[in-house]
């Protein structure tokens, strides 16, 4: 049985940079990937989906020129094969870069295959057993498929990116981040889109006014919604489409479509690893339990990225890598608890989020100050003709520290970084309130908003 200095299982946004950092330090690494070199983000997540968001925005621009005084001849349409080809080329370039780095690194032994634990710190891949004192698990997550949909013809976030023809009527089950992004993309591409959500609101983790604002601008684009869909089931049609039952009591209780996208959540890939063989503990949702330094209950075994339940984003996975690598090689003491929650919903306009929601802050029992501005009050948004949304900042009234922010509107996914930087600096809100921002920008309204908390 061959012994390595470290085994890294999974080539996502934590595993891949960790491989190269450890190899650069002279360690001998076994690097295992069963499917996509580069992981979810590069292959079936951020890179391809945001490429589709960009294509969808281009056709939206082509169809809305009159609003800006620009006459654009009618006839703009989506060539999904070319959209996909552009996406595929971007993915290939990234994957080829990673593979090239692996092939030319004498300290890395690459295994293309599925890893399973067969004993204490013993991993089997391609019928070969290997071992190491340090093992890093970065196997990510996959779409969760409810049992009532297992026998139907469905798409997930991965397979929908392989379509070459635009769906006539795309039904999406799940009114959260993935479902909303793909819903707007394919509506703009030319599909009829219906989004079904079991809850009374979309993206339930956000404040109700944020969710309602997003619901309204997506409805304005022509997306149909069925909320409170508490009696879900699905069947294949003889014509090749699907029928989704959404309600057992009121009409219409069935929706017929050509394609079905399931976007009801994610589940970790840990169930493929035979974790019991090495004694690793998981929580009730199947995530590997880790401490603040990403170490599991077995000393020397770490879990990074989506599989540990500490974050479901590329940026949190990469931060997991930074925590492990810098603590190991740079003498630092970084930990998960230092991380401030931040993420974005990449609809158009996008939502940028940092820290607490208003609901979370109110439930914390703190005394609060809040600032609020509609995008209609922001000159830059009016000039661009993009006035959907609003911005809100929440401040601790006793410490003057920013607790959280929601920026829903044009540039919101970028503007939120200014708030996040102040939070990481642990500086009072007055620092950004008294700053001088460029005019005309969306960011300049943050100081204005903070003047009247």
Image (cartoon, rainbow, N blue to C red):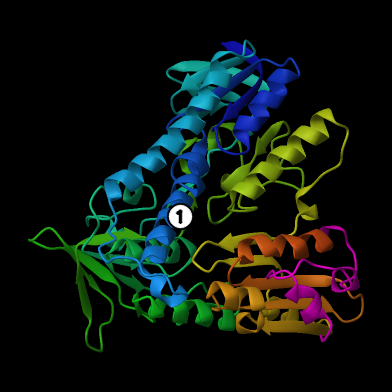
Closer to us: 268 or 275: 268
Q: Crowding near pointer 1: few (<14 within 10 Å), some, many (20+)?
A: some
Q: Viewer-proximal residue, 410 or 277?
A: 410
Residue 276 vs residue 439, the one in the foreground: 439
Left or right: residue 391 versus residue 387 is right
- The answer to if 434 sits in the magenta stretch is yes
Q: Is residue 363 left or right of residue 398?
A: left
Measuring 79% from the left and 47% from the top, which residue is drawn there?
A: 335
Q: Mark 1 points at which residue?
A: 54
The x, y position of residue 214, in whole percent, is: 50, 76
- What is the total number of numbered labels drawn onto the structure image? 1
Image spot of residue 219 (x, y percent): 39, 79
Q: Is residue 206 visible?
A: no
Q: Where is residue 279 in the image (x, y as percent from the top left)?
A: 61, 36
The quarter of the displayed image where residue 423 is located: bottom right
- Label 1: which secondary element: helix
Q: Which of 436 and 426 is in front in this view?
A: 436
Question: What quarter of the picture does the C terminus occupy?
Answer: bottom right
Relative to residue 151, is residue 413 drawn left or right?
A: right
Q: Vertically, is 199 above or below 9? A: below
Position above or below: 184 against 250: above
The answer to which image quadrant residue 135 occupies is: top right
Could you tell me which residue is drawn at 28 percent across and 77 percent down? 246
The percent coordinates of residue 450 (x first, y second) are 81, 79
Give, as a single range, the part of the protein colored magenta. 424-453
Q: Quadrant of the N terminus?
A: top right
Q: Can residue 321 be seen in this view?
A: yes
């Amino acid at each position: 049985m061959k012994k390595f200095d470290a085994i890294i299982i999974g080539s996502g946004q934590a595993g891949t940079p960790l491989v190269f950092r450890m190899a650069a330090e002279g360690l001998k690494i076994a690097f295992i990937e069963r499917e996509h070199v580069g992981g979810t983000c590069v292959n079936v997540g951020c890179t391809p989906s945001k490429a589709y968001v960009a294509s969808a925005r281009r056709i939206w621009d082509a169809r809305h020129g009159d609003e800006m005084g620009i006459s654009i001849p009618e006839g703009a349409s989506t060539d999904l094969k070319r959209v996909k080809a552009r996406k595929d080329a971007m993915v290939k370039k990234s994957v080829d870069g990673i593979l090239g780095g692996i092939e030319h690194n004498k300290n890395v032994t690459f295994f293309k295959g599925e890893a399973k634990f067969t004993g204490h710190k013993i991993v089997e891949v391609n019928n070969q057993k290997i071992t190491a004192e340090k093992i890093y698990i970065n196997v990510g997550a996959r779409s969760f498929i409810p049992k009532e949909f297992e026998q139907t013809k469905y798409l997930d976030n991965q397979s929908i990116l392989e379509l070459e023809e635009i769906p006539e009527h795309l039904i999406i089950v799940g009114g959260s981040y993935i479902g909303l992004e793909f819903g707007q993309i394919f509506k703009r591409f030319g599909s009829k889109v219906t989004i079904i959500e079991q809850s009374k609101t979309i993206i339930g983790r956000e404040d109700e006014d944020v969710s309602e604002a997003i619901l309204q601008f997506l409805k304005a684009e022509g997306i149909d919604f069925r909320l409170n869909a508490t009696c879900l089931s699905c069947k294949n049609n003889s014509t090749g489409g699907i029928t989704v039952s959404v309600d057992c009591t009121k009409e219409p209780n069935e929706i017929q479509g050509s394609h079905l996208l399931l976007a009801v959540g994610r589940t970790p890939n840990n169930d493929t690893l035979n974790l019991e063989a090495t004694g690793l503990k998981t929580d009730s949702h199947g995530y590997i339990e880790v401490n603040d330094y990403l170490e599991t209950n077995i000393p020397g075994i770490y879990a990074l990225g989506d599989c540990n339940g500490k974050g479901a984003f590329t940026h949190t996975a990469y931060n997991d890598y930074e925590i492990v690598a810098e603590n190991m090689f740079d003498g630092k003491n970084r930990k998960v608890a230092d991380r401030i929650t931040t993420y974005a919903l990449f609809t158009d306009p996008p939502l940028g989020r940092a820290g607490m929601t208003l609901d979370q802050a109110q439930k914390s029992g703190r005394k609060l100050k809040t600032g609020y501005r509609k995008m209609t009050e922001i000159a830059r948004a009016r000039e661009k003709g993009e006035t959907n949304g609003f911005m809100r900042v929440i401040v601790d009234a006793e410490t003057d520290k920013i607790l959280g922010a929601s920026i829903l509107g044009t540039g919101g996914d970028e503007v939120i970084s200014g708030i996040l930087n102040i939070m990481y600096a642990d500086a009072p809100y007055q620092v950004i309130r008294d700053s001088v921002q460029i005019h005309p920008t969306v960011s300049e309204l943050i100081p204005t908003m903070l003047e009247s908390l």
